[in-house]
Amino acid sequence: MTSWTRIFAVAGSTAMLGLALTGVASADETPTGPAPMTISADQVKQRCEERVPKIEARIKAATDRINGDENTRGSTKWLEAQAKAARDAGHEAKAKLFDARKELRGEKLTKLGDAQKRIDTFQSEHCNYPGGTK
């Protein structure tokens, strides 16, 4: 094989590789967002009548627990009381753990509020039909 043949072979393969990569790059330019989800009317009815009330009950139970008094295990006030008791007993590390859990309760309330907003939006958009839950 002569040197000119090698040069043309390398140039040709480089050009083919460039064309192949250009084709791949142009294929990647299409939008890759999620496709819209479609469900049947029976599925919407089932979600409105069965799932939404269960989810709302779970959101309410979690919110009530977080906002409960100091006798409600897991509430913010209960965690404060446990941290105080741990500090009084000289267990600073344990008190810090209770304080950290208490700080997370605020974030949890925010997430629960967002979930309730999404449920309310779903109900207003999909559950307002004759015989529906609203």
Image (cartoon, grey):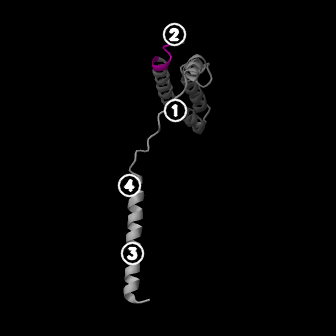
| Residue on which disc 4 sits | 26
Q: Earlier in the sequence, mark 1 or mark 3?
A: 3
Secondary structure state at the residue bearing disc 3: helix
Residue pointed to by mark 1: 104
Q: Earlier in the sequence, mark 4 or mark 2?
A: 4
Magenta span contains residue 35:
no
Are the residues flagged by discs 2 and 3 in contact, CB closer than 8 Å? Answer: no
**The magenta stretch spans residue 126:** yes
Residue nearest the observer in this picture, 66 or 98: 66
In the rendered structure, which amino acid carries the disc numbered 4?
Ser
Label 1 SS = helix
Which is more toward the observer, 128 or 116? 128
From the image, tell me which residue sits under label 3. 12
> From the viewer's perspective, is the residue at label 1 or at label 2 nearer?
2
* Residue annotated with mark 2: 130
Under mark 3, the amino acid is Gly
